Amino acid sequence: MAKKQPEIIARVTDSFPTTETIEQNLLFTRREMLGMAGAAGLTALMGVASGAVPQLAQEKVRIACLTTYWAAPNSHADWIFTKLLDGYWWQGAYTPSRVEVVSVYIHQLEESQLGQKICKVKGIPIFNTAREAVTLGGEELAVNGVVIVGEHGNYPTDLKGHWLLPRWWIYNQVIRVFERSMRSVPVFNDKHFSYNWDEARWMFDKSRALNFPLSGGSSIPVYYRKPEIELSIDTPIKNSIVLGGTADEGAIFHAIDVLQAFVELRKGGETGVRSVQSIRGPETWKWVESNPWAGKLLDSVAKSFELEPGHFQQNPQTNMCVVEYNDGTKAAVIGARNVGWTYACEIEGREEPTIISMLGWAGPFDQYHASNALPHWITELMVTKKEPFNAERLLLSTGIVNHYMESNWENGRYSPVGRRVETPVLNMTYRTIRGAQFNTGERPPSRPYIRGFDQ
């Protein structure tokens, strides 16, 4: 094992939002890190037979993991990175990791003692900047994939409720390396692109200009479903609702991404969004009363869960996002409890609504809190260099959230009944060709949260 390096003070040169000094344990020098890429170093670190190491090292895609914060119990970095390191549960069985995490960047390093500990045990260097993590301390791109988890950490929230997570800021450092190196690699960006629409659009456009596959989004569309079905492509969907957590920007993104994962399958494909509106509090139910299609779908979900009629309407503190699409399709995302995340829709030619639920989300101290399907599709992105679904869907989900957050504000004043925001910037069209992507089969065993699988 490499000799432990002395503790040093490392200055972050590309800091957010201002230059700051972070005290950091530099786990390995670059020379020692490169040495560990050989068979002997990997044998010492991973405890595997030396004869098997060269083959594993050649087969695995080398990736950089960049994050804002890595701690327990509520950091996406911990839920996602550990499965990229140790493997994940997919289609009823444990699947060994097919990627090799060769570098890490943590913006809020001091608050991320867990991330530091895991990287030290695994022998993964933590770099001072995102740029250094993707260049491995050199001048040009030195990894074959990038995973960005800009979720959680001590970041402010603005007046409108935007959580000012520096996703664009981290992503921008990666783009600068791509441009300087004149090549690019697949990028995964957890959750939505950015709280700012201009930044989000820029992030998507850069993927097209530099020709690299891009993905991200919520883990819920690929979580276990009841029933285990997917809508077929070109399903004649008329109207839809999604019920689930909508308490803040991050929560409602999950619900909106669930919505988009289904409605993009409608007949004719995605046509883009005409308008978005936010309604909060008791006014939500007045809107439902004036739109019978939404009330019908709500009642059908209550019946399927054996809840009393009007169950959802008993919550006066709910909120909703109303979405109108360019082809006339309508949808509403409504805050609700006791139904997990549930999608319901009217389909032309069917008398009864179609209802699909994502249930049984494990608690934060459970090993399988995060959907194992998400690390699976991250891995597929890195290995195949193909987007698991159209990145336009993620841009559309991001844009709906962005305009939802703006709807309640006009001329500096807040109103619980938000204005209907016209959204010509969301006039994007595409046709999905993907099949079902959600996890199926036996669920993983529930056990206390650990990092790695017992082998």
Image: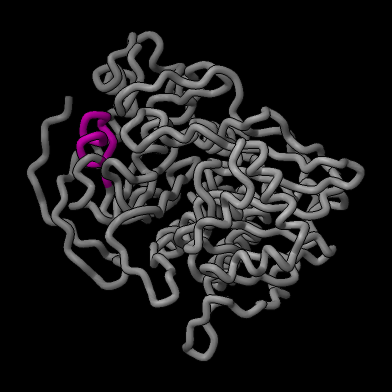
Residue displayed at 43% across by 44% down: 142
Question: Magenta includes 122?
Answer: yes
Quarter-wise, where is residue 177 in the image? bottom left
Residue 300 percent across, percent down from the top left: 71, 44
Q: Give the range drawn in magenta.
A: 115-126
Name the colouring of the figure: one colour
Quick one: quadrant of the N terminus?
top left
Q: Is residue 237 above or below residue 122?
A: below
Q: Residue furthest right?
A: 349
Q: Quadrant of residue 301?
A: top right
Above or below — where is 98 with respect to 77?
Answer: above
Q: Main secondary structure of the magenta part?
A: helix
Residue at 78% of width from left, 43% of height from top? 353
Residue 222 image point, x, y percent: 59, 37
Q: Is residue 177 visible?
A: no
Q: Name the foreground residue: 216 vs 213.
A: 216
Q: In which quarter of the image is the C terminus?
A: top left
Q: Which residue lies furthest to the left in this view?
A: 6
Measured as percent of width and height from the top left, residue 100 is found at 41, 31
View extreme (bottom): residue: 411
Q: Is residue 439 above or below residue 271?
A: above
Q: Is residue 312 left or right of residue 24?
A: right
User: What residue is shown at x 61% (from left), y 37% (from top)?
Assistant: 305
Most foreground residue, 246 or 218: 246
In the displayed structure image, the side of residue 201 where residue 178 appears, left or right: left
- In the depicted view, which residue is nearer to us: 179 or 454? 454
Look at the image and say whether residue 177 sits in the magenta stretch: no
Q: In the image, 138: left or right of 167? A: left
Residue at figure coordinates x 75%, y 50% from the top left:
264
Left or right for 247, reference 420: left
- Please identify the quarter of the rendering in which residue 34 is found: top left
Q: Outermost residue toward the front?
A: 308
